[in-house]
Image (spheres, rainbow, N blue to C red):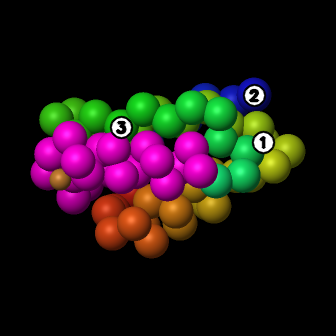
Amino acid sequence: METITLNVSGMQCGGCASTIKEKLEGSEGVTTAKADHKEGKVKIDFDPAKTNVEALKKIIADAGYKPE
Ligand SMILES: [Cu+2]
């Protein structure tokens, strides 16, 4: 299991954070995701055998936010 913290811009409220959390946790290989719209950070626990950082960033981007 690996953990990364991504800087994500575009989250305006707790609803945005919830959207990102749900999309990530609904994807293959993600155990837990915590999004904080005030800090603009998303912390993700994932299985590197099943997913990778690029795939996680794409999920966030597809949800309408900007991972850095
Ligand atoms: Cu929002």
Main SS, magenta region, reads helix
- Mark 3 crowd level (few <14, some 14–19, many ≥20, 10 Å Cα): many
Left-right relation of 48 to 7: right
Q: Is residue 61 above or below residue 6?
A: below
Residue at the spot of label 2: 1
Between circles 3 and 1, the one closer to the viewer is: 3
Going by the numbered disc 1, the residue's amino acid type is Pro
Residue drawn 57% across and 32% down? 32
Spatial CA span between label 3 and label 2:
18 Å
Reading the image, the residue beneath label 3 is 35
Marks 3 and 1, how far apart at CA:
20 Å
- At 73% across and 45% down in the image, what residue appears? 29
Disc 1: CA contacts within 10 A as few (<14), some (14-19) or many (>=20): few
Cβ of mark 3 under 8 Å from ligand 1: the answer is: no
Q: Check residue 48 in the rendering and tell me which mark sits there, or answer none.
A: 1
Q: CA distance from mark 2 to mark 1?
A: 7 Å
The magenta stretch spans which residues? 7-26
Residue located 14% across and 51% down the image: 12
Tags 2 and 1 touching, CB below 8 Å: yes
User: Dots 3 and 1: beta carbons under 8 Å?
Assistant: no
